[in-house]
Amino acid sequence: GQSLEQPSEVTAVEGAIVQINCTYQTSGFYGLSWYQQHDGGAPTFLSYNALDGLEETGRFSSFLSRSDSYGYLLLQELQMKDSASYFCAVLNRDDKIIFGKGTRLHILP
Amino acid sequence: DVKVTQSSRYLVKRTGEKVFLECVQDMDHENMFWYRQDPGLGLRLIYFSYDVKMKEKGDIPEGYSVSREKKERFSLILESASTNQTSMYLCASSFYRRGLGNTIYFGEGSWLTVV
């Protein structure tokens, strides 16, 4: 089978840094993606990692360790608008994209 | 901009009705997906299609079927709606780029209530 584990909720302070972890178990792994979803909206793509290491896109970075079946999303200089749910998603060899259950990020002023 | 359009934003159907959820994308994407999203369960894959007339079961296909007669259109069908199918349904599409990253673009979602 396949599964993804991520924390259900994380709380951080505005201006701080927060890390959202994701561990996965799957066959035919190709890459790990991250999506953001605001309340009432559709998920939107944030980042994708196929190789080990850190990918940086502005305030957001994503990391992958294939040997550990682990990745994380790092959000820096948190803003109130970053309050949302964040999903990790695995791309498999058969082109399936399987999502985790999501992490709700709460940001305190 | 990529646009994935779902035909209905909100629907209320009766138990036992046949329900069609339509999705159209305008980016010539090969792959199309149907997910349902429920609180605490995240997005669960129902079916996906990587080509016209092709379909693959996702994690929760029971009670659903799909149709892809044209590349841009992917329909989700509930043959006999049941109350446990009350949910938000998300359609998505992407290019076929296995191994190179697979950004998927979502529609705005269809909120289905079965009474």
Image: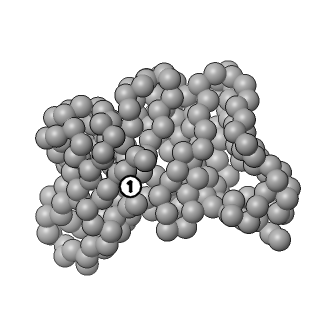
**Which residue does the numbered mark 1 point to in the structure image?**
B107
User: Would residue A11 be visible to someone looking at this image?
Assistant: no
Q: Nearer the viewer, residue A60 or B38?
A: A60
Kindly identify the residue that appears in the image at 60 percent across and 44 percent down.
A46
Q: Chain of mark 1?
A: B
Kindly identify the residue that appears in the image at 48 percent across and 37 percent down.
B103
Quarter of the view holding residue B93: top left
Q: Position of residue B48 (x, y in %)?
A: 31, 40
User: Would residue A52 be visible to someone looking at this image?
Assistant: yes
Question: In the displayed structure, would residue B40 be above or below residue B94?
Answer: below
Question: In the displayed structure, would residue A7 be above or below residue A61?
Answer: below
Question: In the displayed structure, would residue A6 be above or below residue A29?
Answer: below
Q: Nearer the viewer, residue B66 or A23?
A: B66
Q: Position of residue B98 (x, y in %)?
A: 43, 23
Quarter of the view holding residue B77: bottom left
The single residue placed furthest to the front in the displayed view is: B1
Q: Secondary structure at mark 1?
A: loop
Question: In the displayed structure, would residue A109 be above or below residue B104?
Answer: below
Q: Quadrant of the C terminus of chain B?
A: bottom left
Kindly identify the residue that appears in the image at 74 percent across and 66 percent down.
A80
Q: Is residue B39 left or right of residue A17?
A: left
At label 1, which amino acid type do we have? Gly
